[in-house]
Structures are given as structure tokens and as C-alpha cells.
Amino acid sequence: MKKSFGYYLVLLVLKLKGLKPIFSKSPIDYLKLRKSDVLAPSKLLFKRSQIQISSVLKTKIVEISPSHPSENSLLIYLHGGAFVSGPAKHHWDSLKKIGKATNMTIWACRYPRAPESQIDEISKNVDEVYKLALTRFDPAAIAIAGDSAGATLSIALIQRLLSRNVPIPKKLVLISPVADATFTNPEIDVVERTDVMLSKSGVLSAKKMVAVEHDLKDLNLSPLYGSFEGFPETLLLLATHDITYPDQKLLVDKMKSARVDYKLITGDGMPHIWPLLPVMKESRIALDQMISFLDKE
């Protein structure tokens, strides 16, 4: 399939930014990654919305409320960044588009990150955010979305909720989820040659930072090894030129076996988290599909 001009432009920019070299080092230079962080959106970006910032444990919730909320519905968004960085500009830009199109209230969650915090504490923070959401919203009016490590946290949250018999959200959106923190799938080495953003050594280093004494197969880090029985309606947005793709295919197989109601969108030749990247026509189409998924009854 022919790619847009924007696609090639974005690939060039990603190469010039030097993300791949950063993700090729072990230990990963997380402080260098954090230089791209945008911890709060500008008032100008969300000038037609109300912004409120609150705290739950060590998580900052940036609540973005539209002028005319859509029937009291909520999107909880968990950003990516390999557990060590984020959110970044592309997160806020994408959330603006989602909020404008759906009229949903959005909770953009800045959870604690590694190496200052480890996976147990991060998971507890995510649990408490959802617990708070249930005091204000019906679970049938809640959707959860995340990209990369944020998608990992989203899957693991659903698994914990189901194991505890807690009402789950109506919908789940997973953008380039990291399904298995061990990165032992032999297909990864082949895909790595085409990945312009990520490299196994740096990503694995970041996972070890957040795992600390935990096994990398811990379900909060590697939800691929958990159960998918009872999962909500799910949208998966995957990319073939992404080292996390081989394990994502196994994730889809497990969802299929568990009879999850899922929709799969695979970006042929696309990089990691492509629906959130700017300029590309392919990204705009994918984000529109995500909006349609969130917007439909």
C-alpha cells in the first residue's frame, strides 16, 4: 500500500531525533527521554475546555472537560513512555482531537514513573484512579485507553478488576501495547531492523528499572501471560514495524481464544504508536477510527 508523504517525513524526523540510539543503550538514558516530556497541556491548546488538576496518591489527573460533556462519559488515558518518561506533546495533541470529537471528559493520568517508582506502586496508583472514577461515573460510561507502556497498564488493570469482581469499563483502546516485558520472542530481532524508534536493549533496560525485584513475567508488566476472559469491547491499533508487534499478535490470539469482542487495526509499515504521531495521513485515519470506536453506542 502506498504511503503518504507525511509518513516519510515523520520517519525522517524520528531518525533525526535519535530515539533509536537512546533506546539502544542499556541502561536507558531516561533523563534524556524526559527532555521531551510535556507534563501539562497549555491553556491555549484546550482553550474551549475546562482544565482541572487533582491528585490520587502520586498520580496527577489532568481532567479535560468539554463545554458540553457527552452524557457524563469518561475516558481514562494512560500515556506511554517505557514507564520512565511522558506524557509528551503528541499525547496532548491527540487528546484534544479525541475530546473535541467525542465530548467525553478525559482524565489524562500522570502516574509515577521508574526508576523513582516500581510496578507495584504504579499499579496501585492506577487502581486508585479507577476507584475514584467509579465514584463519579457509571462503569458503562467509562472507557480506558493507553499507548505503549500505558496500554500495558490498561490491560493489567482490567485483569486485576476481573480477578477482584470489580465492575469493568465498557471499552478498552490499546495503541501499540507492550504485552510481554521479557522481549524473548525470536521474531523481535527480525522486526527490530525495520523499527525506526525502538530497540530491544533499551526497552528491556526500562522494564528492568520498573520491575526491580519482580520477575519480568509479572502480570502487571507482561499481561500476555494473564487471562482475557471477560474483557470489555476492545480496539487494538498495532504496527508491523514495531518491536512490540510479535507479542501483540500473540495477544490477539489470546483475545480470540477468550472470545473477546475486539476490533483490530494493523498499520502496515507503521512505527510504534503511529496513531498519535503528527502529519501522517495514516495517523489521522487511525485516530478517526479510534474516535468512532469511542463514540459509538
Image (spheres, helix red, strand yellow):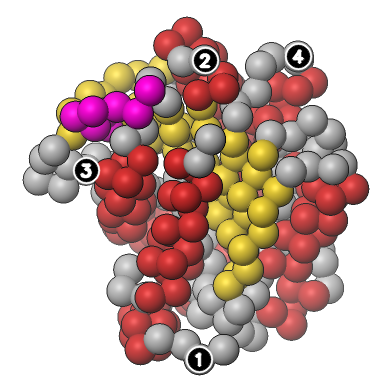
Q: Looking at the picture, how far across and down is residue 71, in whole percent? A: 38, 23
Marked residue nearer the N-terminal end (2 or 4): 2
Residue 2 disc label: 1
Question: Is 2 placed above or below 56 here?
Answer: below
Residue contact at pointers 2 and 3, CB within 8 angstroms: no
Q: Quadrant of residue 203?
A: bottom right
Q: CA distance from mark 4 to mark 1?
A: 46 Å
Marked residue nearer the N-terminal end (3 or 1): 1
Is the residue marked by circle 3 packed among few (<14), some (14-19), or many (20+) residues within 10 Å?
Answer: some
Q: Which residue is mark 3?
A: 41
Q: CA distance from mark 3 to mark 4?
A: 35 Å
Question: Is 270 placed above or below 116 here?
Answer: below
Marked residue nearer the N-terminal end (3 or 4): 3
Q: CA distance from mark 2 to mark 1?
A: 43 Å
Which quadrant: the N terminus? Answer: bottom right
Instruction: Name the element at disc 1.
Output: loop
Q: Nearer the viewer, mark 3 or mark 4?
A: 4
Q: Residue at x 52, y 47 (%)?
A: 293
Residue contact at pointers 4 and 1, CB within 8 angstroms: no
Q: Nearer the viewer, mark 2 or mark 3?
A: 2
Answer yes or no: is residue 142 visible.
yes
Instruction: Name the element at disc 4.
Output: loop
Instruction: Name the element at disc 3.
Output: loop
Left or right, 295 with reference to 272: left
Left or right, 112 with reference to 98: right
Q: Looking at the picture, how far across and down is residue 36, in whole percent? A: 30, 58
Residue contact at pointers 3 and 4, CB within 8 angstroms: no
Three-letter residue code for mark 3: Pro
Q: Nearer the viewer, residue 140 or 273?
A: 140
Q: CA distance from mark 3 to mark 1?
A: 34 Å
Residue 138 disc label: 2
Q: Looking at the picture, how far across and down is residue 139, in whole percent? A: 56, 19
